[in-house]
Amino acid sequence: MNQFDHEKLDAYRAAIEFVGVADRILEQMPPGRGYLKDQFGSAALSIVNNTAEGAGEFRPSDKARFFRIACRSATECAGMLDVCCQLRLADEAIRQQGRELLLRIVSMLTRLAKTHQRLKPKSGTGTGTGTGTEAGR
């Protein structure tokens, strides 16, 4: 089966799962919380999009940069989860589910960024084709 490189990454699959958790929280928010909805939704999508972009890059330093951006978006989402809980916009169970996913995502993206930051550029096709494993896993 043909796959994009990002589809092979556990970090990407966990990010997609987190978008579902974030969406359930966003759906429950009452009117007047648009500023939170926009920020949280954008940050959740940023994890997915930057992970995919990083996987598609062929220069190690560019891959690392996208993975670092995705990681920062994941930690932003962790903060947003805390805000939603503090404002009673999300229950503890869904916050915990999202938090566990984000801890996994941050860990995987950190390893990916560090691994690619150490690599030297190689000549290639630019497809970003890799082994499909998280760095060292």
Image (cartoon, rainbow, N blue to C red):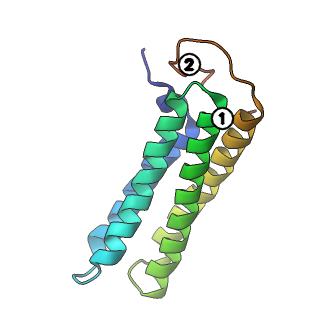
Residue 70: where, in percent of width, then height? 54, 50
Q: Quadrant of the C terminus?
A: top right
Q: Residue at x 46, y 69 (%)?
A: 94
Can residue 133 be seen here? The reply is no
Q: Nearer the viewer, residue 30 or 65?
A: 65
In the figure, residue 133 lies in which quadrant? top right
Q: Residue at x 54, y 73 (%)?
A: 79
Give the mark, 2 or 1, whose residue is nearer the N terminus: 1
Q: Secondary structure at mark 1?
A: helix
Can residue 102 be seen here? The reply is yes
Q: Residue at x 67, y 39 (%)?
A: 112
Which residue is at the far left? 31
Disc 1 marks a residue whose amino acid type is Ser
| Between marks 2 and 1 in the image, the one whose residue lies nearer the viewer | 1
Disc 2 marks a residue whose amino acid type is Thr
Residue under label 2, please give it: 129
Q: Is residue 125 above or below residue 49?
A: above
Residue 98: where, in percent of width, then height? 51, 63
Label 1 neighbour load within 10 Å: few <14, some 14-19, many 20+: many
Residue under label 1, please give it: 61
Q: Nearer the viewer, residue 14 or 128?
A: 128
Q: Secondary structure at mark 2?
A: loop
